[in-house]
Image (tube, rainbow, N blue to C red):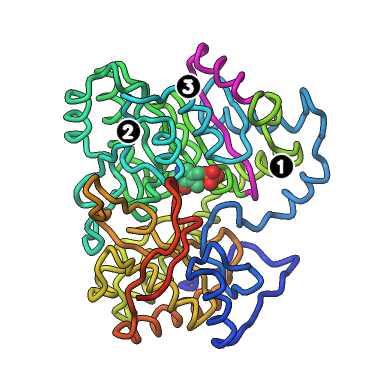
Amino acid sequence: MKTLIEPFKIKSIEEIPITTREQRERYLANAFYNPFFLRSEYVTIDLLTDSGTTALSSKQWAGLMDGDEAYAGSRSYYKFEDAVKEITGLKHIIPTHQGRAAEKILFTIAAKPGIVIPSNSHFDTTRGNIEYAGAEAIDNLVDVGSKPEVEAPFKGNMDLEKLRKLILEKGRENIPLCMLTVTNNTSGGQPVSMQNIRETKALCKEFGIPLFLDACRFAENAYFIKKREPGYENKSIKEIAQEMFSYCDGATMSAKKDGLSNTGGFLALNDDAMAEQAKVLLIITEGFLTYGGMTRRDLEALAQGFEEVLNENYLEYRIGQVKYLGDKLLEAGVPILQPTGGHAVYLDAKRFAPHIAPENFPGQSVLCELYLISGVRAVEIGSLMFGKADTNGNSQSPEMELVRLAIPRRVYTKSHIDYIAEACIETYNNREKLRGMEITHEVEYLRHFTAKLKFI
Ligand SMILES: *Cc1c(COP(=O)(O)O)cnc(C)c1O
């Protein structure tokens, strides 16, 4: 059979808002042309993020009822801990309410001025936490990773030459750990190969630097390894995930992604001394060791989610749904980052609106028009998210200007995807009318969340 079907049936539904263009014009102006300020009741299809937007399974809902809300020693915690240990093999599992809370704890311990934290590509909150601690966050992405039009199987990989150069230049003593983000969200949800994980580990080991996975989408990454890397075609997703984690000394995870849940995360570590420091910070900032800022029923949903996410039928549908959207756009000539990644389709705003300079936020302009046309909400990953002014006040832009259409897990059907494709195609057909934008208000860290903008 050729048709990709959702490997589930629907048991409970939530109505979605249908609005008019006139209404959306008002809503968007009132939101200062920043989709983060839009009320979700004005959004028809919400592709802002795949984080915490998962639909739970009936077994997860059953688990929520069965949660043991004890403050200490909850049975739900031990289920969660067992599930995480089974996959990661790491010794200390420190639960946090989401990924950035794990990052905050890790970098409170590891980062300070003078310190450098390398990665293939840091995600925005990871970079934010490192920079907030006064340290430097440096990306070492393979060159092909920032060429949206070039097809390659593992565009999320670490560039090992860049990493070696960085270690020699900055000095091993200033690099307390190295991160590797799987899949690489910032570079388009692109996977990292097992060979690259293995070689990154070998390089880190040569200098005695611990390797940490930013493991938000470890199962999606494992699926790509199975499909694209020779030698893995007959291994289970769980076996591949276990091998990925076997090369690392620690991990942070936002379980709002591949935990198939609405909240949660963890910091996992092998180092006893570091874990002890982390546990003190956990108790100060998040909660006790056996819940860390989550309700215990959330831990039940997560334990079940970690099992479901390893199911290959689920992953085939998940990655296939994203590809289905990407293929429809490519057929219509809409420029996207190729190949499609695990969790999102990324419109390439540089080719979409070449008449808008990076400092005038072409991606933001595209996503505003997309919303006005259809009520579809997307997010910019470009100059608004990562741009900065240099010391002379000139604006500096990242290499890519992207609009991310993140697909929530198990939420939207094929006809929703068809609607999204139509909306993108219509936006593309109107691209000459797109106008540049400027910021009217911003803050120093993670400005994209709260920036206010206007059209020039
Ligand atoms: C979402 C995400 C984070 C942060 O996790 P939150 O749960 O949103 O705090 C960190 N790294 C990557 C790669 C992510 O996608």
The answer to whether residue 432 is above or below residue 451 is below
Q: What kind of residue is marked 2?
A: Glu
Q: Residues within 10 Å of mark 2 (few under 14, many from 20)?
A: many
Residues at discs 1 and 3 in contact (Cβ within 8 Å)? no
Q: Quadrant of the rendered structure where residue 384 is?
A: bottom left
Q: Residues within 10 Å of mark 1 (few under 14, many from 20)?
A: many
Q: Quadrant of the C terminus?
A: bottom left
Residue 272 on the magenta span: yes
Q: Disc 1 on helix, strand or loop?
A: helix
> How far across and how far down the image is residue 253, in percent?
52, 38
Q: Residue at x 63, y 82 (%)?
A: 18
Q: Quadrant of the rendered structure where residue 369 is?
A: bottom left
Q: Which residues are magenta?
A: 261-283
Mark 1–mark 2 Cα distance, whole angstroms, equals 34 Å
Q: Which mark is residue 109?
A: 3
Task: Check disc 1 and report the residue beneath it.
Answer: 298
Q: Which mark is residue 136?
A: 2
Q: Nearer the viewer, residue 390 or 72?
A: 390
